[in-house]
Amino acid sequence: GENVEQHPSTLSVQEGDSAVIKCTYSDSASNYFPWYKQELGKGPQLIIDIRSNVGEKKDQRIAVTLNKTAKHFSLHITETQPEDSAVYFCAASDSGGGADGLTFGKGTHLIIQP
Amino acid sequence: ETGVTQTPRHLVMGMTNKKSLKCEQHLGHNAMYWYKQSAKKPLELMFVYNFKEQTENNSVPSRFSPECPNSSHLFLHLHTLQPEDSALYLCASSQERQGVGEQYFGPGTRLTVT
Protein backbone atom coordinates (compact mmCIF):
# COMPACT_ATOMS: atom_id res chain seq x y z
CA GLY A 1 0.00 0.00 0.00
CA GLU A 2 0.84 3.68 -0.11
CA ASN A 3 3.21 5.20 2.44
CA VAL A 4 3.52 8.96 2.93
CA GLU A 5 6.42 10.51 4.83
CA GLN A 6 6.19 14.15 5.95
CA HIS A 7 8.94 16.45 7.23
CA PRO A 8 9.54 18.30 9.40
CA SER A 9 7.27 17.37 12.28
CA THR A 10 7.62 20.89 13.69
CA LEU A 11 8.55 24.07 11.84
CA SER A 12 9.02 27.48 13.43
CA VAL A 13 9.45 30.54 11.19
CA GLN A 14 9.43 34.28 11.70
CA GLU A 15 6.34 36.14 10.59
CA GLY A 16 6.82 37.28 7.03
CA ASP A 17 9.27 34.51 6.15
CA SER A 18 8.49 31.52 3.96
CA ALA A 19 7.70 28.00 5.15
CA VAL A 20 8.23 24.77 3.22
CA ILE A 21 6.85 21.36 4.16
CA LYS A 22 7.92 18.28 2.23
CA CYS A 23 6.31 14.91 1.62
CA THR A 24 7.35 11.77 -0.18
CA TYR A 25 5.13 8.93 -1.33
CA SER A 26 5.85 5.36 -2.30
CA ASP A 27 3.13 4.36 -4.79
CA SER A 28 3.91 5.54 -8.31
CA ALA A 29 0.22 5.10 -9.18
CA SER A 30 -0.76 7.98 -6.87
CA ASN A 31 -2.26 10.82 -8.86
CA TYR A 32 -3.84 13.21 -6.37
CA PHE A 33 -2.04 15.13 -3.62
CA PRO A 34 -4.07 17.33 -1.25
CA TRP A 35 -2.85 19.45 1.63
CA TYR A 36 -4.99 19.95 4.71
CA LYS A 37 -4.72 22.54 7.48
CA GLN A 38 -5.98 21.68 10.95
CA GLU A 39 -6.45 24.38 13.54
CA LEU A 40 -6.91 23.67 17.21
CA GLY A 41 -10.31 22.19 17.95
CA LYS A 42 -11.24 21.82 14.30
CA GLY A 43 -11.17 19.14 11.66
CA PRO A 44 -8.72 19.27 8.74
CA GLN A 45 -9.62 21.65 5.91
CA LEU A 46 -8.37 21.36 2.37
CA ILE A 47 -6.18 24.33 1.44
CA ILE A 48 -4.75 23.26 -1.90
CA ASP A 49 -4.41 20.15 -4.01
CA ILE A 50 -2.54 19.05 -7.12
CA ARG A 51 -3.04 16.29 -9.62
CA SER A 52 -0.31 14.37 -11.34
CA ASN A 53 -0.75 16.08 -14.69
CA VAL A 54 0.72 19.37 -13.40
CA GLY A 55 3.96 20.23 -11.66
CA GLU A 56 2.95 23.32 -9.71
CA LYS A 57 -0.15 25.09 -8.50
CA LYS A 58 -0.52 28.43 -6.74
CA ASP A 59 -3.26 30.07 -4.74
CA GLN A 60 -2.26 33.47 -3.38
CA ARG A 61 0.43 32.85 -0.73
CA ILE A 62 0.23 29.06 -1.00
CA ALA A 63 1.83 26.89 -3.64
CA VAL A 64 2.36 23.19 -4.10
CA THR A 65 5.00 21.55 -6.28
CA LEU A 66 5.06 17.94 -7.47
CA ASN A 67 7.99 15.89 -8.72
CA LYS A 68 6.57 12.61 -9.99
CA THR A 69 9.94 11.17 -10.88
CA ALA A 70 11.26 11.62 -7.38
CA LYS A 71 7.83 10.96 -5.84
CA HIS A 72 7.82 14.00 -3.65
CA PHE A 73 5.64 17.07 -3.28
CA SER A 74 5.97 20.21 -1.20
CA LEU A 75 3.84 22.95 0.29
CA HIS A 76 5.18 26.50 0.15
CA ILE A 77 3.71 29.32 2.19
CA THR A 78 5.10 32.80 1.54
CA GLU A 79 4.79 35.92 3.68
CA THR A 80 3.65 33.88 6.64
CA GLN A 81 1.12 35.36 9.04
CA PRO A 82 0.11 34.42 12.59
CA GLU A 83 -3.09 32.80 11.31
CA ASP A 84 -0.97 30.32 9.35
CA SER A 85 -0.05 28.64 12.63
CA ALA A 86 -1.65 25.17 12.53
CA VAL A 87 -0.92 21.53 11.80
CA TYR A 88 -0.56 20.76 8.10
CA PHE A 89 -1.12 17.31 6.59
CA CYS A 90 -0.16 16.06 3.18
CA ALA A 91 -1.90 13.09 1.58
CA ALA A 92 -1.65 10.96 -1.53
CA SER A 93 -4.26 9.02 -3.46
CA ASP A 94 -4.38 6.73 -6.46
CA SER A 95 -8.11 7.17 -6.95
CA GLY A 96 -8.42 10.91 -7.42
CA GLY A 97 -9.02 11.49 -3.76
CA GLY A 98 -11.65 8.90 -3.16
CA ALA A 99 -11.88 7.30 0.21
CA ASP A 100 -9.68 4.29 -0.13
CA GLY A 101 -6.94 6.37 -1.77
CA LEU A 102 -6.20 9.05 0.86
CA THR A 103 -3.06 8.13 2.79
CA PHE A 104 -1.96 10.89 5.15
CA GLY A 105 1.40 12.00 6.45
CA LYS A 106 1.92 12.45 10.19
CA GLY A 107 1.55 16.21 10.05
CA THR A 108 3.72 19.29 10.51
CA HIS A 109 3.09 21.71 13.34
CA LEU A 110 3.81 25.14 11.85
CA ILE A 111 4.53 27.89 14.35
CA ILE A 112 4.70 31.50 13.18
CA GLN A 113 6.83 33.60 15.52
CA PRO A 114 5.74 37.25 15.77
CA GLU B 1 -17.87 25.08 9.94
CA THR B 2 -17.46 22.96 6.83
CA GLY B 3 -21.00 21.61 6.54
CA VAL B 4 -20.13 18.45 8.44
CA THR B 5 -21.24 18.35 12.07
CA GLN B 6 -20.34 15.87 14.76
CA THR B 7 -21.81 15.20 18.18
CA PRO B 8 -20.80 15.00 20.87
CA ARG B 9 -17.63 17.09 20.67
CA HIS B 10 -16.21 15.46 23.78
CA LEU B 11 -16.95 12.07 25.30
CA VAL B 12 -15.57 10.29 28.34
CA MET B 13 -16.59 6.68 28.75
CA GLY B 14 -15.62 3.66 30.78
CA MET B 15 -14.50 0.43 29.20
CA THR B 16 -17.85 -1.25 29.86
CA ASN B 17 -20.00 1.55 28.46
CA LYS B 18 -21.83 1.70 25.15
CA LYS B 19 -21.99 5.02 23.35
CA SER B 20 -22.51 6.33 19.83
CA LEU B 21 -20.91 9.10 17.82
CA LYS B 22 -23.02 10.94 15.29
CA CYS B 23 -22.07 12.68 12.08
CA GLU B 24 -24.28 14.66 9.74
CA GLN B 25 -23.36 16.28 6.46
CA HIS B 26 -25.35 19.07 4.85
CA LEU B 27 -23.47 19.09 1.54
CA GLY B 28 -25.47 16.62 -0.51
CA HIS B 29 -22.52 14.22 -0.66
CA ASN B 30 -22.79 10.51 -1.29
CA ALA B 31 -19.73 9.19 0.52
CA MET B 32 -18.95 9.39 4.24
CA TYR B 33 -15.96 8.27 6.26
CA TRP B 34 -14.76 7.69 9.80
CA TYR B 35 -11.12 8.44 10.65
CA LYS B 36 -9.17 8.00 13.88
CA GLN B 37 -6.61 10.69 14.75
CA SER B 38 -4.08 9.84 17.44
CA ALA B 39 -1.16 11.96 18.58
CA LYS B 40 2.00 11.58 16.50
CA LYS B 41 0.29 9.26 14.02
CA PRO B 42 -1.26 9.79 10.58
CA LEU B 43 -5.01 9.89 10.22
CA GLU B 44 -6.26 6.34 10.04
CA LEU B 45 -9.19 5.54 7.78
CA MET B 46 -11.63 3.27 9.63
CA PHE B 47 -14.79 2.98 7.55
CA VAL B 48 -16.14 4.18 4.23
CA TYR B 49 -19.72 4.36 3.06
CA ASN B 50 -20.63 5.10 -0.52
CA PHE B 51 -24.32 5.58 -1.28
CA LYS B 52 -25.09 4.13 2.16
CA GLU B 53 -23.15 0.93 1.51
CA GLN B 54 -20.00 0.10 3.41
CA THR B 55 -17.09 -0.29 1.04
CA GLU B 56 -14.05 -0.32 3.31
CA ASN B 57 -13.22 -1.72 6.70
CA ASN B 58 -9.54 -1.33 7.37
CA SER B 59 -9.20 -4.11 9.92
CA VAL B 60 -11.01 -2.15 12.58
CA PRO B 61 -11.82 -4.07 15.79
CA SER B 62 -15.41 -5.20 16.15
CA ARG B 63 -15.86 -2.99 19.22
CA PHE B 64 -16.35 -0.21 16.65
CA SER B 65 -19.56 -0.64 14.66
CA PRO B 66 -20.60 1.85 11.96
CA GLU B 67 -24.10 2.58 10.77
CA CYS B 68 -25.21 4.66 7.80
CA PRO B 69 -29.01 4.95 7.64
CA ASN B 70 -28.89 7.45 4.76
CA SER B 71 -26.32 9.40 2.82
CA SER B 72 -26.49 12.36 5.23
CA HIS B 73 -25.99 10.55 8.53
CA LEU B 74 -23.26 8.33 9.85
CA PHE B 75 -22.91 6.76 13.28
CA LEU B 76 -20.09 5.02 15.07
CA HIS B 77 -21.30 2.72 17.82
CA LEU B 78 -18.77 2.03 20.57
CA HIS B 79 -18.72 -0.79 23.11
CA THR B 80 -16.17 -2.32 25.48
CA LEU B 81 -13.47 0.07 24.32
CA GLN B 82 -9.87 0.05 25.50
CA PRO B 83 -7.82 3.00 26.81
CA GLU B 84 -5.77 2.94 23.58
CA ASP B 85 -8.96 3.81 21.69
CA SER B 86 -8.79 7.30 23.18
CA ALA B 87 -8.36 9.64 20.21
CA LEU B 88 -10.05 12.26 18.06
CA TYR B 89 -12.62 10.62 15.78
CA LEU B 90 -13.21 12.54 12.60
CA CYS B 91 -16.05 12.20 10.16
CA ALA B 92 -15.69 13.33 6.56
CA SER B 93 -17.77 13.36 3.41
CA SER B 94 -17.15 13.73 -0.30
CA GLN B 95 -19.27 13.91 -3.41
CA GLU B 96 -18.46 10.35 -4.36
CA ARG B 97 -16.08 7.66 -3.27
CA GLN B 98 -13.93 7.88 -6.36
CA GLY B 99 -12.38 10.49 -8.49
CA VAL B 100 -13.65 13.77 -7.13
CA GLY B 101 -11.05 14.77 -4.61
CA GLU B 102 -11.96 16.91 -1.71
CA GLN B 103 -13.07 15.39 1.51
CA TYR B 104 -14.78 17.72 3.97
CA PHE B 105 -14.08 17.02 7.61
CA GLY B 106 -16.15 17.63 10.69
CA PRO B 107 -14.65 19.07 13.90
CA GLY B 108 -14.27 15.65 15.48
CA THR B 109 -15.26 13.96 18.71
CA ARG B 110 -12.55 13.86 21.38
CA LEU B 111 -12.98 10.42 23.00
CA THR B 112 -11.38 9.47 26.30
CA VAL B 113 -11.70 5.89 27.51
CA THR B 114 -11.08 5.46 31.23
Image (cartoon, coloured by chain):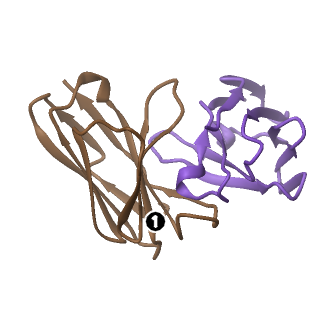
Q: What residue is at 24 percent from the left and 39 percent from the top?
A: B62
The quarter of the picture where residue A25 lies is top right
The x and y percentages for residue B47 are 39, 50
Quadrant of the image containing the C terminus of chain A: top right
Q: Mark 1 points at which residue?
A: B31
Which residue of the protein is positioned furthest toward the bottom in this rendering?
B28
| Quadrant position of the N terminus of chain A in the picture | top right
Whether residue A91 appears in this view of the structure is yes
Question: Would residue A36 appear left or right of A31 to someone viewing this image?
Answer: left
Q: In this view, does B110 lie above or below B14?
A: below
Chain B: colour as depicted: brown
The picture places residue A45, in percent across and down from the top left corner, at: 58, 52
Quarter of the view holding residue B22: bottom left
Q: Which image quadrant is residue A21 in?
A: top right
| Chain identifier of the residue bearing label 1 in the image | B
Q: Which residue is drawn at 56% across and 43% down?
A: A38
Left or right side of B96 for A70: right
Q: Residues within 10 Å of mark 1 (few under 14, many from 20)?
A: many
In this rendering, is residue A40 above or below A55?
above
Total number of numbered discs in the rendering: 1
Which chain: purple? A
For this rendering, which residue is in front, B59 or B89?
Answer: B59
SS category of the residue bearing label 1: strand
- Type of amino acid at the residue the image marks with label 1: Ala
Please state the horizontal and vertical placement of residue A62, each as a whole percent of the image: 80, 49
Is residue A111 visible in the rendered structure shown here? no
Q: Is residue B19 left or right of residue B74?
A: left
Please name whichever residue, B72 or A46, is drawn nearer the observer in this view of the structure. B72
Q: Is residue B11 left or right of residue A35?
A: left
A38 w.r.t. A57: above or below: above
